[in-house]
Image (cartoon, grey):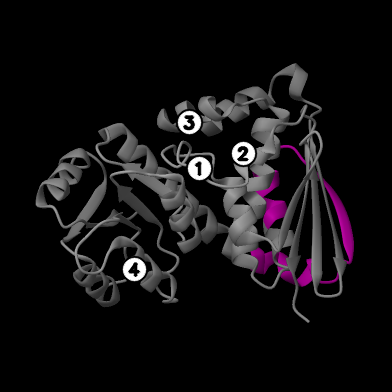
Amino acid sequence: MSQVRLLVVDDEEINRDIIAEYLEDSDFELAMAQDGESALQRLHADAAFDAVILDRMMPGMDGLQVLRSMQSDAQLRGIPVIMQTAAASREQVAEGLKEGAYYYLTKPYHRDALVTIVRSALDSVQRRKELAGEIEQYRGVIALTQSARFRVRTLQDARAITAAISGLATDSSSVSLGLLELLINAIEHGNLGITFHEKASLLAADRWESEIERRLALPENTDKYADVSFEREPQLLRISIRDRGPGFDWRSYLTLNESRALYPNGRGIAVARHVAFRSLEFVEPGNQVIATATTPQ
């Protein structure tokens, strides 16, 4: 695997030095920019960065302006942005999420927090790239299907069904991102009982997938599936996911608040609602979700 390339954007030299020190033992190649203008120049000259660590508050062009410019550029919008901020208020997080910043770091932060957030962002991009190729494999067959029902048990099942169903949507890339998050939520939280804080710890220790495999092998979980179905209507795709769990209070997860913005997890439902789907509705007690997306005419 090629070395991961990160662009660090911060107007304070000491902050750039701290990030370089924190990441010096990681397999990352770092490039530095001291303001928003030079960051965009660097990105336009070389778009082959895997992620951007971006300071929100900078003189001249601030972090949100840089983010907006990246989102308006087809070559740059797929690069994940990790926003640094001195105060992650609810309003700032909501504004950043709307613009496409799904990862936050509040200064000052520890090395482990930085590494975990960076790896979480990179994993998300890798999943999207893998799904993009798989969507094309399924598109021909699934296009002939008006409705279907599936049983999903493993992460591999979730990725396969995501690739198959999202290929029916107009914006298959965004729908695949949101659909996979909902299916993972059904497996890990609904069926296997992995809590928010447990997942954060597992991600930090790089043990999340192995813990899912361990719990799937337990006798009490061998028959736990998520039921997934879709129906096609004129210009509309309706997807239903029901897990075997007791449900949860989904309302607090519909938006990315300031407390969860600093964790490597907990943003999937908010991203699905704001970015991936036309509508997202949970059914009491929270173990079923119905999502809709537009389809080509």
Disc 2 to disc 3: CB gap under 8 Å: no
Q: Name the residue under label 3.
A: 200
Tag shown at residue 77: none
State the SS at label 1: loop
Question: Quadrant where the C terminus lies?
Answer: bottom right
Number of marks drawn: 4
* Rendered residue at 69%/52% (across/down): 160
**Where are the magenta residues, as a range?**
135-162
Residue located farthest toward the bottom when viewing the structure as drawn = 297
Is residue 161 on the magenta stretch? yes
Q: How crowded is mark 4: few (under 14 residues within 10 Å), some or many (20 or more)?
A: some
Q: Is mark 4 on a helix, strand or loop?
A: helix
**Residue 64 vertical position relative to residue 178 in the rendered view, above or below:** below
Real-space Cα separation, disc 2 to disc 3, in angstroms: 17 Å
Residue bearing the label numbered 1: 257
- Is the Cβ of the residue at disc 1 closer than 8 Å to that at disc 2? yes
Judged from the image, the secondary structure of the residue bearing numbered disc 2 is helix
The amino acid type, in three-letter code, at marker 4 is Gln
Residue 39: where, in percent of width, then height? Answer: 23, 67
C-alpha distance separating marks 1 and 2: 8 Å
